[in-house]
Image: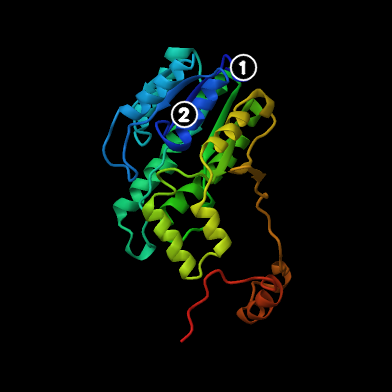
Amino acid sequence: MGSKLKGKNAIVTGAGRGIGKDVSLALAAEGARVVVVDPGAGRGGEGADAAPADQVVAEIKKAGGEAVASYESVTDFAAVGKMVQSCVDNFGSVDILVNCAGVLRDRMIHNMSEEEWDTVIAVHLKGTFNTCRHAAGHMRKQKSGRIINIASAAWQGSVGQANYSAAKGGIVSLTRTMAREMGRLGVTCNCIVPMAATRMTLDDDVKAKFKKQFEAGEITEARYNELVNMPGPEHIAQVIAYLASDAAANINGLVVRSAGGTVGIYCEPRIIKIIHKDYTKHGAWELDELEDLFPKILLSEYVNPAPPEQG
């Protein structure tokens, strides 16, 4: 076992399978004690099963590490408070929080049900808030901590995933805000945008969706091949372990891309073009002015991502 996280105590949600499992194992392999959180729900959030969390705990212990299981749902604010406290009670502090819990309820926006929207928002966005909210108090008091949230490339827009995209975009904004609120206290907060083959990202239904998008011309052949040949989650885990370590103490508020052997950071949001009118002298914009200047200046290199069909 390594020692880069020795003496640190971690909470990992969605830790029974996929990225969360590999993160739990990677943190433990570097000496962290881990609360393995997973209610054992299905891909869509249905059901419960203690086995996934228990199996990860057993694997960590077999390798010589320390871990306990938690079966709480991240959607339950009060239950998450108990879960975070259990890390303190079992190990003495909360030093690392990694939010991997997730579900999918894919549907086009025009026929998405309220329940499909609410379920995905509750697990991804509210769940991330719940864990961060309860862990933040402990981290503020000890003036140290690492929070790593899982976003997705879907935050930039993903057909058939309005609920998931909205949740992941919210997680990016939440992460950036917490980084600014807590950074001065020694607590960092970063986002990972992963690409890894898991039961959520690459089952038969997902593969069929990618093929349909390719055949419809919505994605290129190169992108299609990239998606159906995703690398495993073990590559993501090492990047998260790095961000959780003391070596990453000055990394805060970043959105990090991790996919196989690729690691990168997203650019900071900024205005790239502008038109200006002195409203104090000339009043508000007139429609004729906007019709002239908007396309001429602001849209000079713009391409509509989904132009209307012809015919």
Residue at the outermost left position: 47
> Which of 21 and 159 lies nearest the eye of the viewer?
21
Residue lying at 38% horizontally and 48% vertically, measured from the top left: 104
User: Which disc number belongs to residue 217?
Assistant: none
Q: Secondary structure at mark 1?
A: loop
Q: Which residue is tagged 2?
A: 12
Taking the spot 71% from the left edge, 65% from the top edge, the residue there is: 274
State how far apart marks 1 and 2 are (Cα).
Answer: 19 Å
Q: Is residue 197 above or below residue 107?
A: above
Left or right: residue 25 versus residue 180 is left
At label 2, the amino acid type is Val
Front residue (pair 287, 32): 32
Q: Which mark is residue 3?
A: 1
Residue displayed at 37% across by 32% down: 77
Tell me if 132 is positioned left or right of 7 in this view. Answer: left
In the image, 112 versus 15, the foreground residue is 15
**Residue 75 figure quarter:** top left
- Identify whether 255 is placed above or below 9: below
Mark 2 lies on a secondary structure that is strand
Quadrant for residue 78, please give it. Answer: top left
Q: Residues within 10 Å of mark 2 (few under 14, many from 20)?
A: many
Q: x, y (%) of residue 17?
A: 41, 34
- Give yes or no for contact between labels 1 and 2 (Cβ–Cβ under 8 Å): no
Q: Quadrant of the N terminus?
A: top right
Of mark 1 and mark 2, the one earlier in the sequence is 1
Task: Name the amino acid type tagged 1.
Answer: Ser
Relative horizontal placement of residue 60, taking residue 272 as reference (left or right): left
1 vs 2, front mark:
1
